Image (spheres, helix red, strand yellow):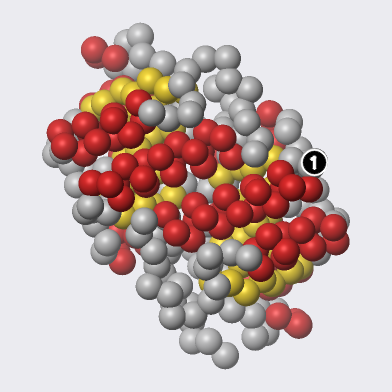
Amino acid sequence: MKPQTISRPINILLAEDSPTDVMLTREALAHAKVLNILHVVENGVEAIEFLRREGPYAGVPRPDLVLLDLNMPRKNGHEVLAEIKADDRLKTIPIVILTTSRNESDLMKAYGSHANCYIAKPVDFEAFAEVVRSIENFWFTVVALPPAA
Amino acid sequence: MKTHTQTKPIDILIAEDSPTDVMLMREALHHAKVLNTLHVVEDGVAAMAFLRREGAHREAPRPDMILLDLNMPRKNGQEVLAEIKADDRFKDIPVVILTTSRAETDIGKAYKQHANCYITKPVDFDAFAEVVRSVEGFWFTVVTLPSTEPPCPTP
């Protein structure tokens, strides 16, 4: 395994409106091999504000990875994804779609809008935690992340 | 873990000009959990010909994933990546950059051009095999890939 040279914690932005899924993600990442800080927003408007450091998010760090739900209030995940991947300052940030949707149309649309990968959430709690750990392990110990722009 | 309902082997296109690296990948994927068929091309021109089913690649399947080297003859990996991600027929195919380059300019450029992920090859053989297995494990057992149905009828 090629470990990243990590001198600071990894910042993960989780855009997710289900408190249960937030809790499960937080729990799974608390035991991660890589030191990480989880930032949570509950809808697509907040996700974009966070990434653009607008309003209450003035001092926030640039996330190293975004875990993006599709079905969210105010602005859905597809809209958030399209905005990120069309923005030269944000498009290099890896976006992992993490959703209950198994619809072919969602899948094709997300990859077509340059989602870095699409993961259908397992319903089972244990399996969900396992998926979160797989994401953490793959993206933070195998992959070379983009340089912090 | 959510696995794909697999009715046919996963088709992986490897664009790599180093025979040693191809051999290592072949070996690592041979023991993969997921049944897969490897298609190997040695340069960027051949990679595009494979995707477009041109010349000798008339019968080529649409790959489920592409493992793309950066430093290749005739057409390099960044050029291939840009062509794939600008083409509506191919842009949804996950492209994993697998290269010896650790240059930040290469990493940044690849993500900017919508590489799905960028991985630097470890020099050590065992570590390299381990990385290939990680790619396989993550992309084929955790990730939901785009439809494996080809957009045009299979020849």
Question: Is B79 positioned to the left or the right of A55 in the image?
Answer: right
Q: Quadrant of residue B106?
A: top right
- On the image, the x and y values in percent for residue B113 come to 58, 44
Say which residue label 1 marks: B123
Q: Is residue B24 above or below residue A13?
A: below
Instruction: Give the farthest residue toward the top.
Output: A59
Tell me: residue A13, above or below residue A106. above
Whether residue A87 appears in this view of the structure is no
Dot 1 alpha-carbon crowd within 10 angstroms: few under 14, some 14 to 19, many 20 or more: few
- Going 56% across and 45% down the picture, which residue do you hit? B117
- Residue A94, above or below B10: above
In the displayed structure, does residue B41 sit left or right of residue A139?
Answer: right
Residue placed most toward the observer, B143 or A27: A27
Q: Quadrant of the C terminus of chain B?
A: bottom right
> Is residue A19 left or right of A10 when viewed as pictured?
left
Q: Quadrant of residue B15?
A: bottom right
Quadrant where the N terminus of chain B lies?
bottom left
Please report the residue visible at 53 percent of the width from the left and 87 percent of the height from the top: B154
Q: Return the residue nearer the eye: B54 or B154.
A: B154
Residue at (42%, 55%) from the top-left corner? B143
* Position in image of residue A76 (x %, y %): 22, 43
- Mark 1 residue type: Val
On the question of residue B106 being in view, the answer is yes
Q: Residue at x 27, y 43 (%)?
A: A69
Q: Position of residue B101 (x, y in %)?
A: 76, 38
Where is residue A35 drawn, in percent x and y? 46, 21
